[in-house]
């Protein structure tokens, strides 16, 4: 049976705004699609949730099948950019009764292949998806794999490699006209959409910033984390975005996911992201008022107060009044009516109780980076390809970057995903296309970067920010998304704050590979 929190999550899922999370991995060379498919299959066999399907007329339980009901792996080499593929995988609704909750696609690019791993949030959360991608790369490194026979109809390239998207990827669903724009403009609690109803599905905007250096300590001696700065910068950027568009600015509530599996582990015990399957995420709301955002030390102190309190208690799967009501309904309403009533309740409460945005910081995951092939005596990187002619040593690529993505439907429509890899913070602005477009996301990202710089140095020596570059054209049928850099967290107060290292951003429409 699904837990009450999972039932609320399932009721919140919409065809036009599916709840998904994922990881996009950048390499500096080519991966073998057959070998990667074998690695994906090997990892799926280890984790039942990756091949589970929902059953029952009201979707109240998982069925763990021996093999996936369809192939979740795809290979795209038609020139489509990896972020465009990732947007489609995240935007297309999941049919969890017929297909597995996982989608994996290798995207061939001249500057280095990209690996897109996307899962439905009901089955896997961000830490589990990141751990899964890390396992897939580890399996690829350790074993040559079994290419297996290719379907002649699928091997369009004539090289025995099956091409195309994974099974069960329907078209992105067009969102029906809604009053979210009016609600957002008048309430002061949501990000004001630049234009409403302009697009469907989700877009992503990747950026890179350097990890802050120095001691980040408040006047009262408390230490500011990277997460505190990210949350405070989100509050300040949204406030400025709304104010500059003539909208009111009121109480803002940023959703902060917390890993419940990590909290349940014994003190000091290492917790692997693959030790637990499913969604093990609690939610805390970090709140600010207009008066807080007019005084940066006050804003930083309030954020730190709330994050410290949230980490000291077990947060609910769904925070606030809506979560309490939903859990009560999931527990006490009889099964025949529960699913329908939950969906109606979520839809009615959404414009009134949804948070302003979400900020999810996965922390440091250096294990996903590095050479894909093993090192040779001469120090080069190689992988072993196994084909009809036997084993052959080929130059192997290396993973150079990874980006965590999450999604949120309107009226929230904004999700900031962060993962630290190799000494940098890789930040992705996930947005619903009814809120932002390829032209407006950079404008919001510029505000976010400025807020990050100010909060990182309240004494006036702001971090250096690279100016924005012109946006690249989008691929057909998909919006271009990329831009400047949001930030991670480090709340600041009236205490001394040290200078933050240089902030840089990749050109829009590209993914940094070095």
Image (spheres, grey):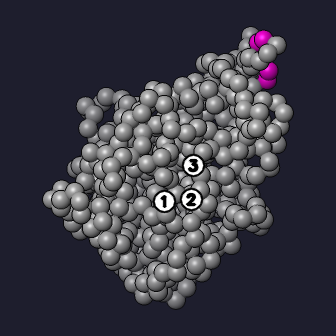
Residue at label 3? 168
Depicted 440 relative to depicted 109: above or below: below
Predominant SS along the magenta part: strand
Q: Find the distance from the CA under tag 2 to the CA under tag 1.
A: 6 Å
Residue at label 1? 18
Q: Pick the residue in front: 427 or 497.
A: 427
Magenta region: which residues? 390-395
The tag on residue 51 is none
Residue 79 seen from this side: yes
**Identity of the residue drawn at 56% across and 59% down:** 91
Q: Does the segment drawn in magenta span residue 392?
A: yes
Rendering quarter of residue 301: bottom left
Question: Few, some or many C-alpha atoms within 10 Å of disc 2 (few <14, some 14-19, many ≥20)?
Answer: many
Rendered location of residue 502, percent (x, y): 63, 53
- Can you say which quadrant of the picture contains the N terminus? top left
**Mark closer to the observer (2, 3):** 3
Disc 3 on helix, strand or loop?
loop
Q: Does the segment drawn in magenta span residue 48?
A: no
């Amino acid at each position: 049976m699904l837990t009450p929190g999972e039932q609320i999550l399932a009721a919140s899922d919409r065809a036009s705004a599916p709840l998904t999370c994922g990881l996009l991995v950048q390499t500096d060379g080519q991966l073998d699609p057959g070998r990667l498919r074998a690695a994906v299959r090997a990892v799926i066999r280890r984790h039942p949730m990756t091949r589970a399907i929902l059953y029952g007329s009201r979707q109240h339980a998982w069925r763990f099948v021996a093999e996936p009901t369809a192939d979740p792996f795809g290979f795209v080499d038609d020139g489509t950019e990896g972020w465009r593929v990732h947007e489609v995988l995240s935007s297309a609704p999941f049919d969890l009764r017929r297909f597995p909750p996982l989608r994996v696609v290798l995207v061939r690019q001249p500057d280095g292949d990209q690996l897109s791993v996307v899962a439905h949030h009901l089955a896997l959360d961000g830490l589990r998806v990141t751990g899964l991608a890390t396992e897939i790369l580890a399996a690829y490194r350790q074993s040559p794999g079994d290419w297996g026979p290719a379907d002649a109809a699928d091997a369009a390239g004539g090289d025995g490699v099956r091409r195309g998207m994974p099974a069960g990827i329907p078209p992105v669903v067009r969102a029906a006209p809604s009053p979210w724009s009016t609600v957002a403009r008048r309430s002061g609690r949501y990000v004001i959409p630049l234009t409403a109803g302009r697009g469907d599905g989700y877009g992503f905007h990747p950026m890179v910033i350097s990890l802050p250096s120095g001691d980040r300590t408040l006047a009262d001696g408390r230490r500011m984390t990277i997460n505190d700065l990210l949350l405070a910068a989100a509050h300040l950027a949204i406030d400025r975005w709304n104010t500059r568009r003539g909208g009111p600015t009121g109480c803002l509530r940023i959703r902060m996911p917390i890993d419940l599996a990590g909290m349940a582990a014994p003190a000091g015990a290492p917790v692997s992201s693959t030790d637990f399957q499913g969604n093990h995420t609690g939610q805390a709301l970090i709140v600010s008022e207009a008066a807080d955002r007019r005084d940066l030390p006050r804003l930083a102190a309030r954020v730190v107060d709330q994050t410290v309190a949230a980490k000291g208690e077990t947060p609910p799967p769904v925070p606030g009044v809506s979560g309490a009501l939903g859990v009560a309904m999931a527990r006490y309403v009889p099964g025949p009516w529960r699913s329908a009533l939950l969906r109606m309740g979520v839809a009615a409460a959404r414009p009134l109780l949804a948070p302003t945005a979400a900020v999810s910081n996965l922390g440091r995951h250096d294990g996903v980076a590095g050479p894909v092939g093993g090192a040779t005596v001469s120090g080069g990187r190689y992988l072993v390809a196994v084909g009809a002619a036997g084993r052959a040593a080929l130059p192997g690529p290396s993973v150079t970057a990874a980006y965590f993505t999450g999604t949120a439907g309107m009226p929230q429509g904004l999700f900031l995903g962060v993962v630290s890899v190799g000494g940098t913070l890789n930040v992705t602005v996930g947005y619903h296309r009814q809120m932002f477009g390829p032209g407006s996301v950079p404008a919001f990202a510029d505000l976010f970067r400025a807020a990050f710089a100010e909060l990182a140095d309240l004494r006036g020596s702001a971090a250096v920010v690279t100016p924005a570059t012109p946006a690249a054209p989008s691929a057909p049928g998909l919006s271009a998304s990329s831009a400047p850099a949001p930030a991670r967290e480090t709340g600041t107060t009236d205490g001394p704050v040290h200078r933050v290292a240089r902030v840089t951003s990749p050109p829009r429409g590209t993914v940094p590979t070095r």
